Amino acid sequence: MGELKSDLARGCELIETHISWVFLHGQTVIKVKKPVSLGFLDFSTLDQRRQACEQEYVLNQRLSRDVYLDVVPITLDADGTHRVDGSGAIVDYAVRMRRLDDAHRADVLLRKGQLRRDHMHRLATRLASFHAGAERSAAIDSFGSLACIRQNVLENFAQAQGLNACCISQQQEREIENRQLGFLEQHRDLFEQRIRAGRICDGHGDLRLEHIYLAANSLDIIDCIEFNERFRYADVCADLTFLVMDLAHQGRADLAEDLLADYAQCSGDYDLYALADFYTGYRAYVRAKVASFLASDEQAGADARAAAEHNARGYYLHALSAQREPLTAPMLIAVGGLIASGKSHTSRQLSHLLHCPAVDTDRTRKHLLGVGFETRIDAAAFSEAYGQEFTARVYAEVLRRAEVVLNSRRSVIIDATFRSAAERGAARQLATRLGLPFCFIECQAPRGIALQRLQERARAPSVSDARADIYDEFARTWEPVTELDPAQWLTLDTSLGESGIEAILRERFAPDGPQLHPGAGA
């Protein structure tokens, strides 16, 4: 009688992980669970493997389009051969999938130098939408508690014990443990705040580059965690930073920061920056531990074990460096000006240049009102939305969000009109209080160009509610900049066009090339 692995591998390509055999047959993939028990998962019985296959099929429908086809039995036929959905007795189960084109896989695109910032925006938008609609409950919230996270962290250390001696020293291991456990102790309140904010959900649990396929007209994310709810029920930040860590680990801290910045803007969740570095280190240790399992698996091939040991060493070192000081000092950049003066476009360009987030009043206002970002709020139902009292609340929230980002040792851009000296002064005071550099960019454009922009904007959905009929009144109430030192003030003519604006911004803020802020795992 043949072995399942060797029988199913005939005539196809086999990919082996610490928990699965994946058989690639032309345009079809057959994925079989290994009969293993590793503490955090148990596939040791036939029924457990069947249930895991069924869970995998159901859960992965959420982020992939017609990729997971069905669950099929593995049979042992009369001639002693294992087959997929044969006529013999059922001895195992497998998930059958449609094979996706590896040329579109994110790790392949990365190796070819084809993974771009626009891919990060697509990913951030998709993941923010997925997390917003993911299941939530009091039971799921409990997995975001300090006690549960501490259990996960301690379990990592216990399960890796004895497997990592060839990868890092005892001193390095102790430093990782002290950093992660120390963060939990020093920031206990953060985890309760995340629960109250509704940021714990039924997520993906294993957001890695090799699980993401970015075709021109589709985006599929596969292979979520199905075997342990404790790893899938988590803070959205924990879910996202698995991918952030993976990007930074592959030498693309710029894309990692771009993903964080775009996700924060798409979701309105800038508070994730308070936890991003902790979860990045945690996720790196998870990857190191898993690689250590395969490296020590005597049943795996020699090449697979050697590659796993190399990967484990890299991930352990990544976990060690995740919460260390960044290479560049953060700063606060406020971008303001009259309506349609090019503030938001300039903020986006600067965000791309510096790989840091932009916090804007338009989205913040709508987030506080509980409406979609493109919902117009200039109607009577929202008559107070632009009143003095609510506007003050919006600016206070924008500054609070900016401070969270700055405290994570990253630069931040604030996109607002800043029409008064008091509003500009509040931003400068935040930077001064934190001992950080500050600059106010005053965007300017000729009246005719601004009115043309407003007319074009009115024809399509927009996060801005500004209209042409209020332009002159807004300009009348603008308070000229007289309170800032020239070194903290830059006037920018946005009629220069994108390349002209970029040249000015690059010369002022990144004269030696784009600044990379490696706080999220670089």
Image (tube, rainbow, N blue to C red):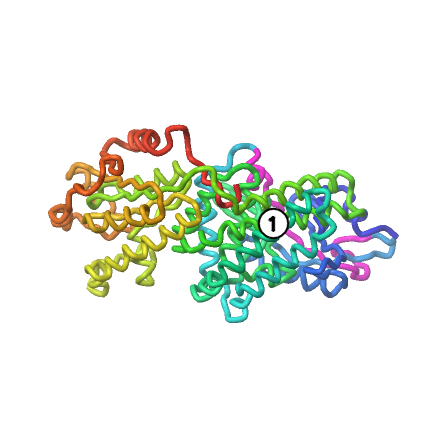
Query: Mark 1 — residue?
Result: 176
Highlighted range, magenta = 82-111
Residue 379 picture location, percent across and down: 21, 61
Residue at 81% over, 48% down: 7
Residue 57 picture location, percent across and down: 62, 58
Q: Is residue 403 left or right of residue 133?
A: left
Q: How many numbered badges does the structure rendering display? A: 1
Query: Can the viewer see residue 53 in this picture?
Result: yes
Q: Amino acid at mark 1?
A: Ile
- How crowded is the residue under tag 1: few (<14 C-alpha within 10 Å), some, or many (20+)? many
Residue at 74% over, 59% down: 37
Q: Residue furthest bottom?
A: 138
Per the image, is 114 magenta? no
Q: In the rendered view, would you say 237 is above or below 443?
A: below
Query: Can the viewer see residue 67 in this picture?
Result: no
Q: Is residue 440 left or right of residue 226?
A: left
Per the image, is 108 magenta? yes
Residue 442 picture location, percent across and down: 23, 40
